[in-house]
Image: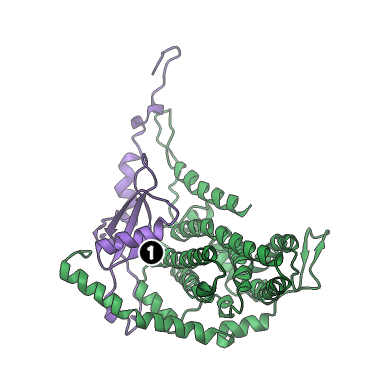
Amino acid sequence: MLLDEVESAEAALRAARRQQVPAETSGVPAGGPEIDSFEQLIAADLKIEPRDEMPEAYRKTLIRQIAQHAHSEVIGMQPEANWITRAPSLKRKAILLAKVQDEAGHGLYLYGAAETLGVTREHLVGLLLTGRQKYSSIFNYPTLTWADMGAIGWLVDGAAIVNQVPLCRCSYGPYARAMIRICKEESFHQRQGFEILWTLARGTPAQRAMAQDAVDRWWYPSLAMFGPPDQESTHTERSMAWKIKRFSNDTLRQRFVDTTAGQAEALGLKLPDPHLRWNPQRGSYDFTPPDYDELRRVISGDGPCNRQRMAHRRAAHADGAWVREAAAAYAAKHGTGAE
Amino acid sequence: MNSGTGSSAGQEPVTGEDGGVGVPLWEVFVRPRRGLSHAHVGSLHAPDAATALRHARDVYTRRQEGVSIWVVPAAQITASSPEEKDAFFDPAADKAYRHPTFYPVPDGVPHL
């Protein structure tokens, strides 16, 4: 159960802290060399904290990864916000609002974590708005029906969970702590999506067909969320050595397929892969990989909704400028600011 | 944060972003429930204290994670320096006699 893994990652943080307390009865102080160099901390599976000494490349790669993760959360609000006004019931509207609100919150936790590495929020937002940093390619696909809300919650959030649970043990403290928080909230997202599809799959033939169509369109893009295959993944070795990345792309992709195939059977919906089959020798499902050429095209800007997502984000930033200016003016006038 | 050895990395400014003046950074502390102390949960940006408090409620207590919130301007926090931590904290390392385990308790002595 993935939530158990999150709990144990959190418990590991508390246990590590207790290792520092000396328990000497002989009067001799706790001996041994201090573990405090970057390499020693990484080797001992202890956390790097803000302002610790760290290789510049470690700092830069983390800024990029955490910031792009944050951008993904915020851009990811768009495909689902698309259906808030058309949710089929008040309860489902409230739930979808809560989910989208969570995504905003996840973006904020992650921007906060990135900022501890010595960058400003303004700088990171600028990198997104000018296209110099990216966001997860999955959000460049359109949400065509209400059933897409179910498919996204079940498959896209499901894939995100498989990706994010290992990050709860990443070597950089603020990122690991943000991921623990995010993972706890993410599991509601997946169950919410599953429940939407469960209801549709047991509804009218048209609802059933809508659910199946959404699954057909979101399955392969969800597999692509894990990135290119291992032999093409350029930064993996160094990220693994620094304990930022704990498992390879293909390992996580396989884990996602193995956990999801049984859920599809329970739903009574088919995953659109004629080669999906349990392999007893491997103890895993055999499956058709996603189209990596399509992934490359979508990442580089040629997906169905890339332009729309960026235009929406830029407009939101521009349209909100008067609010930021008014709030700053009010704070300055009333002297209630931060100084 | 203020410190003697602060290191903010040089980064090229992105022009046009809020005219180069950032919205202040606040650190957020939440008391999860009565009986526990406030714990640091993260940070956020807000123009003033009242807004920072409301944002903190919306970002960090959506699932009833807290009964009390403190927000503190990050610039007001003075932090010990990681580079100086050895010299700063070393004096405590060789004073095992501050711990009860330093003292052998003879057999048969009750309540010690």
Q: Colour of chain A?
A: green
At label 1, the amino acid type is: Thr
Residue shown at the point (68%, 62%) measured from the top left:
A255
Question: In the rendered image, which quarter is residue A108 located in?
Answer: bottom left
Q: Is residue B50 left or right of residue B105?
A: left
Residue at the farthest top position: B108
Q: Position of residue A30 (x, y in %)?
A: 42, 37
Q: Position of residue B70 (x, y in %)?
A: 30, 53
Q: How many marks?
A: 1
Give the residue number, with chain letter if any, for mark 1: A116
Residue shown at the point (55%, 75%) measured from the top left:
A136
Q: Is residue A147 visible?
A: yes
Disc 1 is attached to a residue of which chain? A
Q: Position of residue A5 (x, y in %)?
A: 59, 52
Q: Colour of chain B?
A: purple
Residue nearest the observer in this picture, A235 or B41: B41
Q: Is residue A287 left or right of residue A2?
A: right
Residue nearest the observer in this picture, A316 or B107: A316
Split into 4 quadrants, where in the image is the C terminus of chain A?
bottom left
Residue nearest the observer in this picture, A205 or A213: A205
Q: Position of residue B77 (x, y in %)?
A: 26, 57
The secondary structure type at the circle numbered 1 is: loop
